[in-house]
């Protein structure tokens, strides 16, 4: 049954989607394949790290009591390299040459870095500074203690997390399974990427942009192709798409006489939960479920398709992948120009972001906000949100901007001037 009663706000529509989504099952993978995945298990330390008190410097392990006078000449009794175990106890008047990461020998309670010493002979060194007990020692367990939780379930696996997993010797680990996603484009007017140019047709771009939006989330989707606006052909394609965890259907969700997607989905047993959201671009967006499969019917207009993907598909797919944070980061930015708006629909305006002199962010429209103009999407750093109740914004007003993928980079580091 189609529920055609009420138009929803974006927030209510997101809540409806998320009500039907839970994290997927877990699977075991190799550490080398884990980047970008989400941990489905708690990871604990397998030993104390460091496993014993170790030197933080290349230098000499000493007894601090020998140096209370501010320096001393000491006999070097052994060399201890990282990976070695010390063989001797350091007695009064003695020291051991020690490398960064090597275990502290018994008897020693401090390390003097090599820069604060003067070699007199091979086995005799002059220490020129006083030292406190514990100096330049990394104590046993200061990074992690055996059995401690070092990574919680739900942690996104970044390069730093990969390093921690390797440290605790996890060659294999449990992560959430990624959803299998299919994309179907619909429309008699569409011309495939490889088809010869025909001026009367419209180049099919949505399935590629959607594919890339999914790839940016770590998902490799399947593109099913282009279905013509005929119910039986559409049904054949949609049936295929419903075998996936998520089906994205592009186009055909409006109320035109050739828009057969929603009735055909209903015939195939899909329950539609909503089919209009008070937003611009993107008004005719629909969401349905059949069993555990999710179906998003995205508007055909290329920008609307991408914006609706951001609002509804991103949080759903991220939850399926086990991410606790479902939405893109939003930042506050100051508008450099006024924005006209009538209360009713939330509006998503494509903007670029720049930093002002005080370190705040400035948002500027990328130009045409037509839902067919993809070039202004290609230039955007983010989507500025004009709330549904707003009656317009003035230049200088603050607004929230949802960052788009790739907007977390800038030209300079801020630390070094690049010379040309
Ligand atoms: P529809 O939602 O099917 O009414 O489509 C609205 C408009 O979006 C159409 O007039 C097409 O110009 C455009 N459109 C639909 N599907 C695609 C697609 N897959 N790629 C690019 N443009 C599309
Ligand atoms: Mg169409």
Image: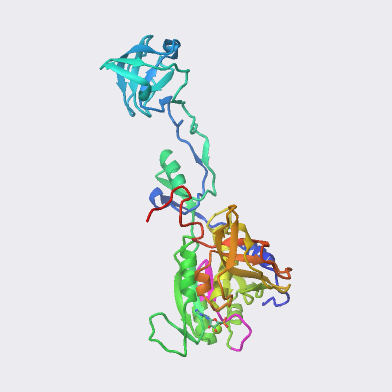
Residue extending farthest left: 122
Find ligand 2 in the image and state its quadrant. Answer: bottom right
Choose between 59 and 1: the one closer to the eye: 59
Range of residues picked out in magenta: 239-257
Left or right, residue 86 beside residue 41: left
Residue 137 against residue 213 in the figure, above or below? above
Q: Residue at image x 60%, y 75%? A: 269
Is residue 294 something that shows in the picture? Answer: no
Residue extending farthest bottom: 200
- Is 244 inside the magenta-drawn segment? yes
Q: Residue at image x 30%, y 18%? A: 119
Residue 86 against residue 371 in the figure, above or below? above
Image quadrant holding the N terminus, namely bottom right
What x and y, as percent, mark residue 327?
A: 59, 59
What x and y, as percent, mark residue 380?
A: 53, 67
Residue 194 against residue 175 in the figure, above or below? below
Q: Residue at image x 37%, y 10%? A: 91
Choose between 125 and 268: the one closer to the eye: 125
Left or right, residue 108 beside residue 374: left
Residue 266 against residue 133 in the figure, above or below? below
Choose between 259 and 373: the one closer to the eye: 373
């Amino acid at each position: 049954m189609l529920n055609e009663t009420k138009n929803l706000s974006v927030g209510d529509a997101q809540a409806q989607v998320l009500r039907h989504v839970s994290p997927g099952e877990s699977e075991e993978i190799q550490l080398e394949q884990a980047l970008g995945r989400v941990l489905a298990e708690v990871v604990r330390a397998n030993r104390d790290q460091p496993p014993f008190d170790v030197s933080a410097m290349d230098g000499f392990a000493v007894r601090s009591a020998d140096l209370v006078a501010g320096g001393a000449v000491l006999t070097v009794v052994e060399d201890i390299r990282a990976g070695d175990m010390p063989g001797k106890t350091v007695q009064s008047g003695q020291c051991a040459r020690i490398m960064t990461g090597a275990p502290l020998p018994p008897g020693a309670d401090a390390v003097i870095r090599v820069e604060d010493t003067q070699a007199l002979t091979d086995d005799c060194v002059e220490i020129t500074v006083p030292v406190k007990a514990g100096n330049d020692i990394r104590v046993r367990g200061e990074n992690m203690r055996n059995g401690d939780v070092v990574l919680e379930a739900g942690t996104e696996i970044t390069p730093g997390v990969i390093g921690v997993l390797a440290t605790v010797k996890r060659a294999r680990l449990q992560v959430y399974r990624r959803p299998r996603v299919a994309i179907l484009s619909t429309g008699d007017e569409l011309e495939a990427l490889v088809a010869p140019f025909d001026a009367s047709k419209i180049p099919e771009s949505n399935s590629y942009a959607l594919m890339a939006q999914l790839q940016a989330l770590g998902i490799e989707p399947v593109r099913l192709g282009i279905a013509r606006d005929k119910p039986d052909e559409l049904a054949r394609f949609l049936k295929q798409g419903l075998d996936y965890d998520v089906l994205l259907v592009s186009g055909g969700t409006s109320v035109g006489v050739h828009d057969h997607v929603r009735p055909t989905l209903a015939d195939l047993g899909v329950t539609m939960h909503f089919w209009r959201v008070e937003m611009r671009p993107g008004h005719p967006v629909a969401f349905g479920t059949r069993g555990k499969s999710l179906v998003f019917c995205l508007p055909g207009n290329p920008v609307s398709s991408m914006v609706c993907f951001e609002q509804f598909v991103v949080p759903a797919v991220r939850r399926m992948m086990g991410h606790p944070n479902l939405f893109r980061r939003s930042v506050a930015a100051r508008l450099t120009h006024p924005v006209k708006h009538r209360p009713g629909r939330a509006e998503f305006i494509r903007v670029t972001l720049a930093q002002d002199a005080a370190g705040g962010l400035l948002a500027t429209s990328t130009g045409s906000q037509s839902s067919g103009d993809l070039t202004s999407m290609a230039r955007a750093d983010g989507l500025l949100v004009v709330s549904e109740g707003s009656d317009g914004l003035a230049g200088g007003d603050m607004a929230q901007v949802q960052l788009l993928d790739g907007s977390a980079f800038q030209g300079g580091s801020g630390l070094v001037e690049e010379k040309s």
